[in-house]
Image: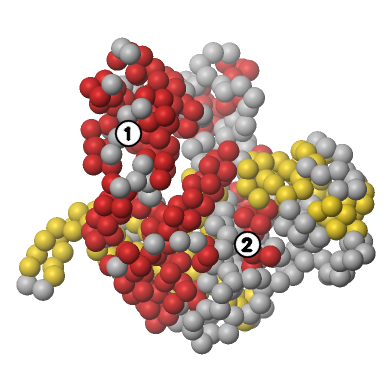
Amino acid sequence: MTIEQIKHTIIEQILEVAPDIEENEIVPNENIQRSLEIDSFDFLQILTALKVQLGVEVPEADYGTVDTLEHMADYFDKRL
Amino acid sequence: MSEFKMPSLGADMESAVLMEWLVKEGDHVEKGQVIAEVETSKGVIEIEVFEEGIVEKILVEEETECAVGTPLAMIRSEDNIPQETVSTAPESTEESSEPKTTVEPIELEAEPAPSIQPTATEPEEAVSEERVKASPAARKKARELGIDLTELASEAGQTIQLSEVEAAATVHKTPASDGMRQAIARAMSRSNAEIPHYYLSASINMTPALEWLTALNAKRSIQERILPAALLIRAVVKALEEVPQLNGFWQEESHQVSKAINPGIAIALRKGGLITPALLNAQKMGLEGTMQALSDLITRTRSGKLRGSEMTQQTISITNLGDLGVERVYGVIYPPQVAIVGLGRITDTPWAEGDSLSVRKVMQATLAGDHRATDGRTGALFLEKLNDFLQQPEELL
């Protein structure tokens, strides 16, 4: 899976969890939770969905390294 | 035989559209069974019947707008079932374990809590079939001003910009949101006019609880992870079991303590607005159960699938504005409740213990209490118990 495909998968899951967000509101290097008003509950939903899609589980200790779309894509890219 | 009527699901509700019947004539219904879905300004809500019997006749067709109190169906008690008086209170408030304290809880029945439960803090964006294209800034502004973007869309045609929203604001009235805003205004004015609030605040060292939770979650799969919010709600519920006076109502000049602990959880809707549905019978749930119930409640709140009882049975409110960076929340009590618990942001703070100074995760917990029902000492006791439980999180399992 290329990093672009990973990004696409992440965006899909964000839109699935928060259907009122539009794709163009997701800025690659902005904090996902703050810029999109995603709370801790939704964030966990997104990571849970990505576990199912990509098979990689993000431990709580790594939350700091998956704060933006770019960082999250890198994180999964290294582990796939 | 009794009439099943359109319930009031909030002070701002005058009518709702009966969307779908989930039962048909001749069906047997159980007490507490969801029998229809209605659409309100807060989304689709499932409404329950509060007696057992047979659906004798359906009086209203689907997709009909009905005022509150309109008879929707006739329910006939079955012959072998003892005739019950029409109770609008769900079973949930009637059964629960005995509280440990000396306060005599009053059995709550018949009338559900007058449903002044709010409510949106911002006018809600009108629901549109197809989402209108608008810049994020325009969308935000429109939400603040309560402007319906769908109306602008037909005028503008393409992506709506901030300037267009601002221009519209000068001429635009928001009749749709007026009703809800007015209802909130009435409830909150009544609260401030009638309820002599007292406010208390305490700093709680959250490091032990968060470290304990991190260790617990490390052993669990991502699907089973427990959020700090669930741990906090669980701690509030445990503290309320010790100090039950804060869980109940002030009605007709008297204080009624509820056996069931149904905290109204303030849940923000991303499209704007806030709903405070009840986590019913939270006293019966462990930590795991609290997380599952919270998860379910948030999901259904945001997808618009709440039940009528969840809109009306709150016995206390919990608001957590920590996500927005607020350190301390001084709440306004929703009448007829007698308390609201505010949980602020958890911040790294210098913390003295004995002779040593260290950095700890600290949260400001606040309590607004109704001074007619309880005294500051009761509130102080509650915050102390809350703190105690959070220092020994294993007791919250």
Residue A53 pos. (x, y %): 41, 25
Determine whether, in the image, residue B306 is placed left or right of residue A39. right
Determine whether, in the image, residue B365 is placed left or right of residue B182. left
Q: Where B47 falls versus B144 (above or below)?
A: below
Q: Where B235 falls versus B163 (above or below)?
A: below
Which residue sits at x=50%, y=61%? Answer: B285
Check the residue under mark 2 and report the chain it is in.
Answer: B
Q: Which of the 4 image quadrants contains residue B366?
A: bottom left
Q: Nearer the viewer, residue A1 or B208?
A: A1
Which residue sits at x=82%, y=44%? Answer: B23
Which quarter of the rendering shows the C terminus of chain A?
A: top left
Identify the residue position indicated by label 1 in the image. Answer: A57
Discs 1/2, front: 1
Q: Residues within 10 Å of mark 1 (few under 14, many from 20)?
A: some
Determine whether, in the image, residue B182 is placed left or right of residue B316. right
Determine whether, in the image, residue A60 is placed left or right of residue A40. left
Q: Nearer the viewer, residue B72 or B226?
A: B226
Report if residue B133 is visible in the image. yes
Which residue sits at x=73%, y=43%? Answer: B37
Q: Amino acid at mark 2?
A: Gln
Check the residue under mark 1 and report the chain it is in.
Answer: A
Residue A71 pos. (x, y %): 25, 26
Q: Where B349 falls versus B41 (above or below)?
A: below
Q: Nearer the viewer, residue B216 or B241?
A: B216
Identify the residue position indicated by label 2 in the image. Answer: B313
Q: Is mark 1 in CB contact (under 8 Å) with mark 2?
A: no
Q: Where B47 falls versus B270 (above or below)?
A: below
Report if residue B329 is visible in the image. no
Q: Residue furthest left?
A: B355
Residue B105 pos. (x, y %): 59, 80
Q: Amino acid at mark 1?
A: Glu
